[in-house]
C-alpha cells in the first residue's frame, strides 16, 4: 500500500469517534487472528468440539474427518 494511501486512511480513522476507532481495532484484530489461524493451518481447535458427555476432540477425530479422495472421486473413473 502506498504511503499516501495509508496516510489518508489514518487521517480518516482519526476523524472517527473513539467508539468507532475501538470497533475498527476489534475488526482488524479479528481479521488478523483469522489470517493467522489460516496460515498456521488451524481450522479446528482441540477441545472446542466435543460430544455431550464432554469428551474432547483428539488427533484421531481429525484424521477420521479428513477427506481421502479415491481416483474415482478425482477423475470420475
Image: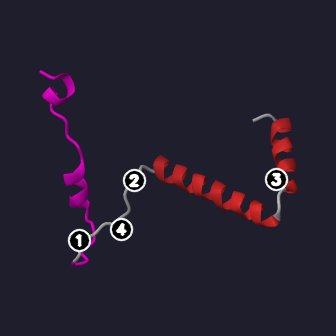
Instruction: Decide which of tag 2 and tag 1 comes sooner along the chain.
Output: 2
Q: How is the image coloured?
A: secondary structure
- Cα distance in 3D space between marks 1 and 3: 45 Å
Which residue corresponds to mark 3? 13
Quarter occupied by residue 6: top right
**Residue 73 as seen in the image, left or right of residue 49:** left
Considering only order in the chain, which callout, 3 or 1, is on the residue closer to the N terminus?
A: 3
| Percent x, y of residue 45 | 38, 62
Give the alpha-carbon distance from disc 3 to disc 2, as whole Å: 32 Å
Cβ–Cβ below 8 Å for labels 3 and 2?
no
| Residue picked out by circle 2 | 43
Q: Which of the two marks, 2 or 1, is nearer to us in this view?
A: 1
Looking at marks 3 and 4 on the same chain, the residue that comes earlier in the sequence is marked by 3
Horizontal and vertical percent position of residue 55: 24, 74
Q: Residues within 10 Å of mark 2 (few under 14, many from 20)?
A: few
Q: State how far apart marks 3 and 4 are (Cα).
A: 36 Å
Stretch of the chain drawn in magenta: 53-77
Q: Which residue is mark 1?
A: 51
For label 2, the SS is loop
Mark 4 and mark 2: Cα distance apart in space: 11 Å
Question: Residue at position x 36%, y 68% from top?
Answer: 48
* SS at badge 4: loop
First in sequence: mark 4 or mark 2?
2
Image quadrant in which the C terminus is located: top left
Q: Is residue 33 magenta?
A: no
Q: Is residue 67 above or below residue 51?
A: above
Please, is residue 39 above or below residue 50 in the view?
above
Magenta run includes residue 75: yes
User: Which numbered dot is residue 48?
Assistant: 4
Amino acid at each position: 500500500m502506498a504511503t499516501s494511501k495509508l496516510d489518508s486512511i489514518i487521517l480518516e480513522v482519526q476523524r472517527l469517534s473513539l467508539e468507532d476507532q475501538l470497533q475498527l481495532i476489534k475488526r482488524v484484530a479479528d481479521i488478523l487472528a483469522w489470517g493467522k489461524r489460516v496460515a498456521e493451518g488451524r481450522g479446528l481447535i482441540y477441545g472446542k468440539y466435543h460430544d455431550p458427555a464432554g469428551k474432547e476432540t483428539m488427533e484421531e477425530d481429525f484424521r477420521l474427518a479428513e477427506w481421502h479422495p479415491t481416483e474415482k472421486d478425482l477423475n470420475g473413473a
